[in-house]
Amino acid sequence: QVQLVESGGGLVQAGGSLRLSCAASRSSFVLTSMGWYRQAPGKQRELVASITSGGVTNYADSVKGRFIITRDNAKNTVYLQMNSLKPEDIAVYYCNARLSTILRTYDYWGQGTQVTVSS
């Protein structure tokens, strides 16, 4: 089991910045990847950004150039720096930790943190 504790959401004006944090209860070296997903009202949950244990990153096209995902392995924490926020970024953001084994893949989720952008 992996517990994930998120923080950093809130209300910001369009063009502003927020930083989300997600602390994992297990060493991030063990986890295959960590990342952030978001779910806006009436929409499906979508990948925002992810980072592998080796540091390879992946971003949704809609956030490329604006969001940066990093991880601090010493703190078992992943961060999402969100810049130039837009109203279309409004959603609940969920931290994800993925553990892949030979037999199966396990996905763990945080409780979610609300991000609201005022226009």
Image (tube, rainbow, N blue to C red):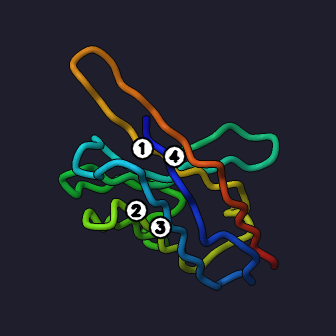
Element marked by disc 3? strand
Q: Position of residue 68 (x, y in %)?
A: 41, 70
Q: Position of residue 69 (x, y in %)?
A: 39, 65
Q: Residue at x 72, y 81 (%)?
A: 14
Q: Quadrant of the C terminus?
A: bottom right
Q: Label 2: which residue?
A: 78
Q: Residue at x 44, y 64 (%)?
A: 64
Alpha carbons under labels 1 and 3: distance apart: 14 Å
Q: From the viewer's perspective, is the residue at label 1 or at label 3 nearer? A: 1
In the image, taking residue 92 as reference, residue 80 lies left or right, namely left
Label of residue 97 in the image? 1
Precedes in sequence: disc 2 or disc 4: 4
Residue type marked 2: Val
Residue type marked 1: Ala
Q: Residue at x 22, y 58 (%)?
A: 55
Residue type marked 3: Leu
Picture layout, residue 66 above or below residue 4: below
Q: Are marks 2 and 4 in contact (CB under 8 Å)?
A: no
Mark 4 surroundings within 10 Å by alpha-carbon count, few (fewer than 14), some (14 through 19), many (20 or more): some
Label of residue 80 in the image? 3
Question: 80 and 102: which one is in front?
Answer: 102
